[in-house]
Amino acid sequence: MTLHDMLPSAVEFLRSKTQGASAPGIAIVLGSGLGPVADTFTDPVVIPYTDIPGFVGSTVAGHAGKLIFGRLSGKRIVAMKGRLHFYEGHSMEQLTFPYRVFKRLGIETLVLTSAVGGISPRLKAGDLMAVRDHINFMGENPLRGPHYDDYGARFPDMSEAYPKSLRDIAKKAAKSLKFELKEGIYCAVRGPSYETPMEIQLFKKWGADVVGMSVIPETLISHQEGVKVLAITCVSNKAAGLSGRPLSHEEVMETGRRVEKRFSGLIAKIVEML
C-alpha cells in the first residue's frame, strides 16, 4: 500500500480522535527548542506520530514527535510538536506525508517554525525572521516521483511560495508586541552535519540570509496542495566561520529557550490575526 493510499486512513483516524470538535483551519510546526509553545494550547488532544497511519516518529532532541489538536487565541489549530527531517533517514514522501494529511483535514494556512544559522550580518542570535523566498540546496524535491491529480499541479509555480499577505500579518503582530520581525532568504541543506565555512560563503553570495535543514520540503508540498505558508525562523547562532566558535545542537536549544516567551507570543498573535 502506498502512502497516497493511506491518506484516507490517516484522516479518518485523526478525526476519530477529535470527535465533536470543529476542523482546524491552521496548522503549526514547532521546530528545534520551540516545542513549549504547544504548552499554551487549551483543550489539547495529544497523539504520538507513531500512532497515526502513515506517520513516522521523530528521533531528534527537542522534537517530541506528537501531533496536538487544541485552541490557540480562541481558534482551532493542529500543531506538530517536533518535525521530521530528511537527515533522519526518512524519504521525502514520508517526511511530507503529514502535510498531505493537513490539507485533507481542512487546513488552509500552515505556519512553519525552525531554528537556523544566521548568515546575514544584520541578523544576530535570538532574532526572528519571516522567510520571503528560499534556495533549495538539499539535492532533492519531494514532488519528484508518482503524481496524483488530488495533489494539485504537477508543475506548481513557486513565484510566491510565502505570500506577502501572511508576512505582513506576521510583521504587524511582531510590531504590536514591540519588536521587529526581520525578513529574508532561507537556504536549505540536507544535514545533519553543519555547513563548512566555505559553503556559508557560497550561500552568502547567492543571497541567503539564513541556513537550515528543513522548511523547504514542507513548503513545496503545502504550496502544491493550495495551503498558504508562513515560515518564521529563529536565528540560533551565527553560521559556520562567522563567529569563531564551533556549532552545536545545545546552542540551538539554548537560544530556543531564551526566546521562548517572545516566540510563543508572536505565534499566538499571528493566529489571532489570521
Image (tube, rainbow, N blue to C red):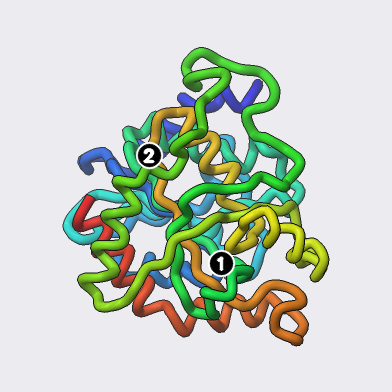
What's under tag 1, amino acid-wise? Ala
On the image, the x and y values in percent for residue 214 come to: 61, 53
Query: What kind of residue is marked 2?
Result: Lys
SS assignment at label 1: strand
Q: Residue at x 77, y 65 (%)?
A: 195
Q: In the drawing, does residue 122 fall left or right of residue 226?
A: right
The residue to which callout 2 is attached is 228
Q: For residue 173, which numbered disc appears in the image?
A: none
| Residue found at x 50% / y 22% | 151
Q: Position of residue 11 (x, y in %)?
A: 42, 32
Compared across the picture, whether 262 is left or right of 42 comes to right
User: Residue at horizontal 43%, vertical 80%?
Assistant: 259
Q: Which residue is at a point 75% across and 65% down the rendered structure image?
A: 201
Task: Tally the marks.
Answer: 2
Nearer the observer, 13 or 251: 251
Q: CA distance from mark 1 to mark 2?
A: 21 Å
Seen from the viewer's position, the closer of residues 115 and 197 is 197
Residue 96 left/right relative to 241: left
- Determine if residue 222 is in view: yes
> Could one spot residue 43 in this view of the protein?
no
Label 1 environment density (alpha carbons within 10 Å; few <14, some 14–19, many ≥20): many
Closest to the observer: 7 or 121? 121
| Farthest top residue in view | 149
Q: Which residue is mark 1?
A: 115
